[in-house]
Image (spheres, rainbow, N blue to C red):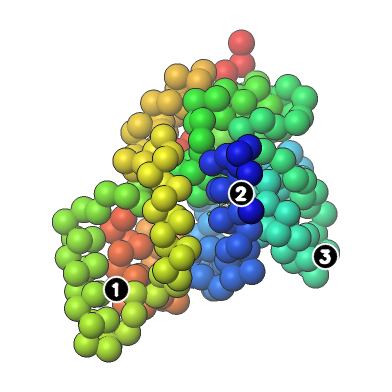
Amino acid sequence: MVGANYTLRDEIREYWSERAATFDESPGHGIFSESERMAWHGLFARHLGPAEGRSALDLASGTGVVSHLLDELGFRVTGLDWSETMLERAKAKSAVRKSRIAFRLGDAERIMEEDASFDVIVTRHLVWTLVDPAAAFAEWLRVLKPGGTLIVIDGDFVNQGRIERLIVRLESLLARRGRGGNGTALSGDLAERHRSILARLPFREGARAEKVAAMVEQAGFCDIAIDRRLGAIHRAQARHMSLTRGLVRQVQHRYAIRAVKPVD
Ligand SMILES: C[S@@+](CC[C@H](N)C(=O)[O-])C[C@H]1O[C@@H](n2cnc3c(N)ncnc32)[C@H](O)[C@@H]1O
């Protein structure tokens, strides 16, 4: 029963909690190959340099995929997510791998940490789903140390370019002829809830890199760079997807944004 105090935030949390059990099974979420792992390491090394034991906060850590990548590189990692189900899976994986990641329950828009606590913040696939992105970016600036680096990995999953539209049309044609589904794996109910949540979010018209980067700058970050060189990651992921999904992955508007907290 949904009470009067049930908010959009509760709805988003429940939506992700229900996806936790199968989250790692989708290529693009879980990591399916050593070449993908190496490609992620390359992206982080490009923007963060050697870890040297620095502290990193993985915001909206989900099942801990990014936390583990950062741990492998030698960061002291804290993973934060507001879904208990996601956190349980992250902790279970961490126990098997004997990693020392600290997973905590919390809201990425109101982080219960001291000012200047972390050298690095990384967040993958959170920004598009933020209820108050401007407040979140200000909060991330607060918990970063001066000179610390933020990496946002995200995409515009709303607008389709011409090539993506063509591939999606081909995909539904093939599906109608019984030649493979679209492989997105969202059931009717989850897909409908996803649509309904998205329609009420600030980034409902798509989290374009330029727009997100401008908001990050507005929050007080400097030295901002948009990195679209994610091809090695996407090609590695595509090998584990249907042909059409793999092609879509490679033409979507996906990016990493690197930003630095000024040293004043
Ligand atoms: C698409 S999943 C991404 C998980 C992980 N970052 C990854 O890339 O594998 C989105 C995650 O964001 C979390 N999330 C969404 N909004 C959040 C918030 N305000 N605070 C904390 N976690 C949040 C959800 O619980 C979910 O685990």
Q: In this view, does 172 lie above or below 49?
A: below
Q: In this view, does 89 lie above or below 175?
A: above
Q: In this view, does 183 lie above or below 131?
A: below
Q: Circle 1 sits in a helix, a strand or a loop, which is it?
A: helix
What is the number of the mark on residue 244? 1
Per the image, the residue denoted by label 2 is 2
What is the number of the mark on residue 95? 3
Mark toward the start of the polypeptide (3 vs 2): 2
Between the residue at mark 1 and the residue at mark 2, the CA separation in whole angstroms equals 38 Å
Q: Which residue is drawn at 39% across and 75% down?
A: 183
Residue 253 seen by the camera: no
Mark toward the start of the polypeptide (3 vs 1): 3
Quarter-of-image position of residue 147: top right
Q: Residue at x 73, y 54 (%)?
A: 84
Q: Mark 2 and mark 3 in contact (Cβ < 8 Å)?
A: no
Quarter-of-image position of residue 208: top left
Query: Is 139 displayed left or right of 105 in the figure?
Result: left
Q: Where is residue 88 in the image (x, y as percent from the top left)?
A: 76, 60
Quarter-of-image position of residue 167: bottom left
Between the residue at mark 3 and the residue at mark 2, the CA separation in whole angstroms equals 35 Å
What is the number of the mark on residue 32? none
Q: Where is residue 228 in the image (x, y as percent from the top left)?
A: 36, 47
Queried on whether the Cβ of the residue with tag 3 lies below 8 angstroms from ligand 1, the answer reads: no
Between the residue at mark 3 and the residue at mark 1, the CA separation in whole angstroms equals 36 Å
Q: Where is residue 134 in the image (x, y as percent from the top left)?
A: 49, 25
Q: What residue type is labelled 2?
A: Val
Query: Is 155 displayed left or right of 53 in the figure?
Result: left
